[in-house]
C-alpha cells in the first residue's frame, strides 16, 4: 500500500530518524518506537511490537535518497540491501581523498572532467615497465557510450597485476571485460583474455588492494615468455555490453545523460552568445554562422533559416547546464527545458544593464525599478 509520504513520516525511528523498516520494531517506555538496528543499543526495557510490524509490512516506503532522485518504493525489510546499492547514494570522489566533492554515481564522470581531467583517458589502457618498480594508477574512460573507472597495482617482485574495474552505466545489468596484454615493441606478441564481469560502481572501489581478500589479479610473470619477454607491456581493458542487452537497449542509449564529450562540444558554440548550440538551431541572418535557440529569439522581424547541417549532430549530444553550479547533464533536445526551469537560472533585467540576476533576487530587483507586488 503506497501511502502519501506525509503519513509515513509518523513511522520513523525515534533514535536514527529513518523509517521503521528493519525488524524487530520495539516500543520504549515513553511510547516511542525504535527500529531493529537501534533496538540493539537500547538501554531501557523495550517491548516487541508484532502487531505494529505486521501493519508496517503492508506499506511501501520511499528510499532514504529520495531527495537525490531515487523513485523506488520499498517494502518492510528491503531498506538495507537497497540503500547499500542505490545508484543515488552519495559517493565521495574516488580520485583523491583530499577532494571534498560528493555526488551520485551518474555524476562521477562529469566531476572528473571538471576537477580531475588529468585522469581521463581516451581508452582504458596503460603501460607497465616490467622490471622497473612497483606501479599503480587510476583512470576513467568513456568509449562508445560505456563509462568506466579502473585502478591498478603492479608488484614488480611478484610480477602480479591487481586491478579493480567498475562501470557507471546504471541501466546495464551486465558488463563484459575484455583484456589485452601486448608487447610494447612488437604488437604481434599479444594475449587476449576475458576478465570477470565489471560491476556498477560501488563502495568496494575505495578499498585498498591489501584489504581485498580475493582481488582481481593477472599473473603477468607467467605470460612474459609468451610475449617474448618484453621490457614494457601495454594493458588494455575494454568494457562491453553483452549483445542480448545491447539489442534491448538499441546497442547504446544515445540519450544517456551520464557523460559529456568536451572534445566534441568545444566547437559547438553559438556565434552570437558563445554558449553551447542547443536545438532548434538556426543560421545567423547576418553572418550565416550557427546560432542557438536562445539567440534566435532576438531576431524578431528577421526570419532566420533553420540550420539543418548540424541539427543531427547536436540533437543527441550531451551538454552541461549553462547555469553556474548546476551539474545537470542532458542531451541537446532535453537540456533547453531544464535550463528554463533550473533552480540556478539567472535572469536578465529588461530595464537596466545590470549583471544577470539570481532567481531569488528577481522580485526585489523589480521592486527597485518601482514595481509593486
Image: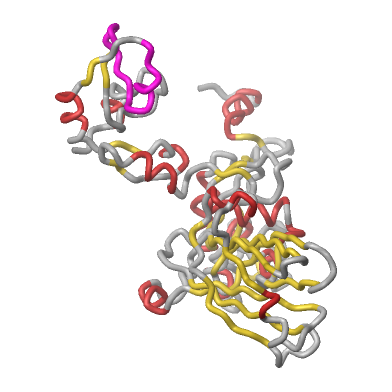
Does the stretch in magenta take in 34?
Answer: yes
Position of residue 51 measured from the top left corner of the image (x, y, whole percent): 14, 24
227 above or below 361?
A: below
Give 155 or 317, whichever is nearer the viewer.
Answer: 155
Q: Residue furthest right?
A: 132
- Quadrant (top left/top right/bottom left/bottom right) for the N terminus: top left
Most distant residue in the bottom direction: 188
Residue 301 visible, this angle: no
Q: Foreground residue, 360 or 60?
A: 60
At 65% from the left and 42% from the top, the residue drawn is: 101
Horizontally, residue 222 falls left or right of residue 254, namely: right
Residue ID at (49%, 72%): 176
Pinpoint residue 270: horizontal percent, then vertical percent.
Answer: 68, 63
Q: Return the residue nearer the eye: 136 or 1.
A: 136
Residue 12 location (% of width, % of height)? 33, 24
Residue 83 visible, this angle: yes
Q: Quadrant of residue 123?
A: bottom right
* Residue 236: x %, y % from top left: 66, 76
Q: Quick check: 318 left or right of 182?
A: left
Q: Which contiguous range is marked in magenta?
A: 28-43
> In terms of image quadrants, where is residue 308?
bottom right
* Colour theme: secondary structure
- In front of the other: 79 or 302: 79
217 left or right of 267?
A: left
Q: Can residue 372 be found in the magenta stretch?
A: no
Q: Which residue is pictured at 50% across the width and 22% down the height?
A: 373
The count of marks equals 0
Amino acid at each position: 500500500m503506497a501511502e502519501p509520504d506525509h503519513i509515513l513520516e509518523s513511522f520513523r525511528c525515534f533514535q536514527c530518524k529513518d523509517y521503521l523498516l528493519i525488524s524487530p520494531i520495539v516500543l520504549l517506555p515513553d511510547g516511542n518506537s525504535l527500529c531493529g538496528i537501534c533496538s540493539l543499543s537500547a538501554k531501557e526495557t523495550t517491548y516487541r511490537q508484532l502487531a505494529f510490524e505486521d501493519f508496517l509490512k503492508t506499506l511501501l516506503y520511499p528510499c532514504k535518497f529520495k531527495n537525490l532522485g531515487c523513485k523506488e518504493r520499498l517494502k518492510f525489510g528491503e531498506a538495507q540491501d537497497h540503500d547499500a546499492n542505490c545508484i543515488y547514494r552519495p559517493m565521495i570522489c574516488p580520485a583523491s581523498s583530499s577532494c571534498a566533492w560528493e555526488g551520485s554515481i551518474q555524476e562521477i564522470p562529469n566531476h572528473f572532467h571538471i576537477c580531475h581531467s588529468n585522469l581521463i583517458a581516451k581508452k582504458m589502457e596503460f603501460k607497465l615497465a616490467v622490471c622497473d618498480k612497483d606501479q599503480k594508477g587510476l583512470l576513467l574512460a568513456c568509449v562508445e557510450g560505456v563509462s568506466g573507472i579502473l585502478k591498478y597495482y603492479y608488484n614488480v617482485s611478484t610480477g602480479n597485476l591487481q586491478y579493480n574495474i567498475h562501470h557507471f552505466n546504471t541501466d546495464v545489468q551486465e558488463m563484459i571485460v575484455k583484456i589485452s596484454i601486448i608487447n610494447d615493441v612488437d604488437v604481434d606478441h599479444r594475449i587476449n583474455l576475458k576478465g570477470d564481469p565489471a560491476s556498477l560502481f560501488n563502495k568496494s572501489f575505495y578499498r585498498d588492494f591489501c584489504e581485498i581478500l580475493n582481488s582481481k589479479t593477472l599473473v603477468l610473470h607467467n605470460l612474459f615468455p609468451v610475449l617474448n619477454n618484453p621490457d614494457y607491456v601495454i594493458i588494455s581493458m575494454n568494457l562491453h555490453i553483452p549483445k542480448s542487452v545491447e539489442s534491448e537497449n538499441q546497442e547504446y542509449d544515445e540519450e544517456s545523460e551520464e557523460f559529456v564529450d568536451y572534445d566534441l562540444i568545444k566547437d559547438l558554440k553559438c556565434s552570437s552568445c558563445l554558449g553551447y548550440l542547443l536545438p532548434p538551431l538556426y543560421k545567423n541572418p547576418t553572418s550565416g554562422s550557427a546560432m542557438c535557440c536562445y539567440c534566435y529569439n532576438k531576431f524578431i522581424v528577421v526570419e532566420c533559416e533553420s540550420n539543418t547541417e548540424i541539427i543531427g549532430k547536436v540533437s543527441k549530444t550531451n551538454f552541461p547546464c549553462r547555469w553556474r553550479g548546476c551539474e545537470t547533464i542532458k542531451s541537446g533536445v532535453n537540456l533547453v527545458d531544464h535550463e528554463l526551469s533550473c533552480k540556478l537560472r539567472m535572469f536578465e533585467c529588461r530595464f537596466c544593464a545590470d549583471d544577470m540576476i539570481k532567481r531569488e533576487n528577481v522580485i526585489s530587483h523589480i521592486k527597485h525599478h518601482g514595481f509593486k507586488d
